[in-house]
Image (cartoon, rainbow, N blue to C red):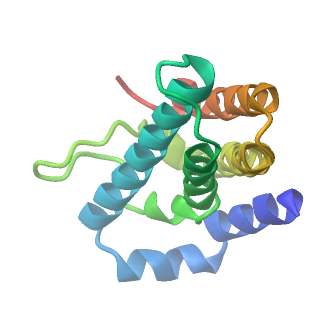
Amino acid sequence: MKTVIAGALSALLLGGAVTAAYAQVSPEDQIEIRQAGFSYMAWNMGKIKAQVIDGSVEYNQQQVSAAANAIDAIANSGMGALFGPGTEKDIGDLHTRADPALFENMQDMAELAGNLGTAASNLAAKAEAGDQDEIRVAFGEVGKSCKSCHEKYRME
């Protein structure tokens, strides 16, 4: 199933569906939406980190599972369609940290996005099962996946 999702994301990024998505959402909105999605994923990662990694908040399996499901949903939502033409640069007051090199390497980005989707789906499954040791490992894999893209395609 995870391979199917990764393949679907790759097809979305590289196929004609991307063109249709660009036509429906302005470059400004694409930047705002993708930044909101990544911020929401980060917020949910923080919730899991506080409960399972740091232990600074009491563990609540339902909250961790809900956070992992949110991450999974966003990671597998086809957000690659929000990296359309004109979104590689700042627009007005909107600032993007996407490196222009990302837009020249969409196949690589599709692979990285597929890896994130797979890791996020695994995190959701582990969170649902509730074994904190397994959640820690899966959480680390999501973090590594995020970092692999940030190191290549995110500007400071």
Work out whether 79 lies above or below 38. Answer: below
* Residue under the image location 48 percent in, 42 percent down: 44
Question: Along the horizontal axis of the image, is 59 left or right of 119?
Answer: left
Question: Along the horizontal axis of the image, is 150 left or right of 124?
Answer: left
Question: Along the horizontal axis of the image, is 79 left or right of 7?
Answer: left
Q: x%, y% of residue 98?
A: 41, 40
Q: Quadrant of residue 146?
A: top right
Work out whether 16 lies above or below 11. Answer: below
* Residue under the image location 72 percent in, 26 percent down: 136
Name the one closer to the observer, 60 or 24. Answer: 60
* Residue under the image location 71 percent in, 50 percent down: 124
Can residue 87 be seen from the camera position used here?
no
Q: Quadrant of the N terminus?
A: bottom right
* Residue under the image location 73 percent in, 47 percent down: 111
Name the one closer to the observer, 128 or 9. Answer: 128
Q: x%, y% of residue 122?
A: 79, 46
Can residue 2 be seen from the camera position used here?
yes
Q: x%, y% of residue 100?
A: 42, 40
Q: Quadrant of the C terminus?
A: top left
Q: x%, y% of residue 48?
A: 56, 34
Work out whether 76 lies above or below 96. Answer: below
Work out whether 1 lies above or below 35. Answer: below
